[in-house]
Image (cartoon, rainbow, N blue to C red):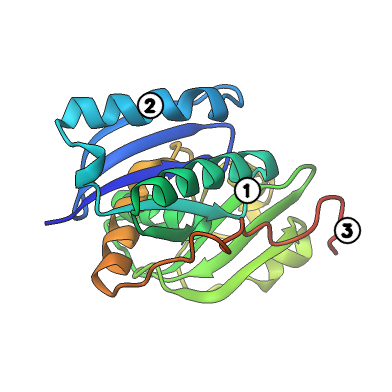
Amino acid sequence: MANFLLIDTSTACCSVAIAKDNEVLYQKIIETGNQHATMLPAFSQACLQSTNILLKDINAIGISIGPGSYTGLRVGLSFAKAICYANQIPLIAVSTLQMITYGMLTITNHTKGIYLPMIDARRMEVFTANLNEKADFIKEPFPKIINDSFINELPTTEKIFAAGNGAFKLKSFTHQHSMQIIDEQICKAQYLATPTFEKFSKNDFSDIVNTEPFYLKQFGEIVV
């Protein structure tokens, strides 16, 4: 069995978890304010102590790589890289949108449909993607403004689920399309457990030196 330290700083929420294979043993989380740099060391230590797992027994670190908060992603990845480099621990990068989808699947019980994880990108814009009930990408991540055009592009023959801190922007359009908006906070490190375990099983590791946050677009770039 493998032990994983899991880190998510993609939003204002900061969370760290310990998992054994794909089973989460413990998690520390703070949902208010951008306190990633301050909380990550303390949260990581608390998770290790609470599970009686030593850093030398961690087999890999799973990190949500983005898209998301520009500052949060940089802080989280830098912290993870430092631990990996100093302790010779493999790094596993997971799409934040895929992480959110795994959270959605625990709520929908893998109901067949199209999953729309959404990260708030200010105003009516989100970072999103289309995934299926297996958390496989149907449409790769893209930035999009939520408007009538976006809603009209959604298929009407399949159940649609949406979640994430940008999904609230869909609420004014639900009368135009049948969809389930999941309000629960699911931008959490615990939902990195399954994709981290799957990548670890395939030796799908990220380059500690060259891996960068996946911003999806440059700060200030206009999306239509």
Q: Could you tell which of marks 3 and 1 lies nearer the N-terminus?
A: 1
Question: Is residue 169 something one can see in this rendering?
Answer: yes
49 to the left or right of 66 = left
- Expressed as whole percent of the image width and height from the top left, the position of residue 120 reads 66, 45
Q: Which quadrant would residue 190 be assigned to in this image?
A: top left
Residue furthest to the left: 1
- Distance Cα–Cα, label 2 vs label 3: 36 Å
Q: Could you tell which of marks 1 and 2 lies nearer the N-terminus?
A: 2
Return the mark for residue 68: 1
- Expressed as whole percent of the image width and height from the top left, the position of residue 140 reads 58, 73
The local secondary structure at tag 2 comes to helix
- Expressed as whole percent of the image width and height from the top left, the position of residue 116 reads 53, 60
Q: Residue at x 53, y 47 (%)?
A: 77
Task: Identify which amino acid the numbered label 1 is placed on.
Answer: Gly
Task: Identify which amino acid the numbered label 3 is placed on.
Answer: Ile
Which of the image's four quarters has the C terminus?
bottom right
Q: Residues within 10 Å of mark 2 (few under 14, many from 20)?
A: many
On screen, 221 above or below 8? below
The local secondary structure at tag 3 comes to loop
146 to the left or right of 90 = right
Which residue bears the numbered disc 2? 43
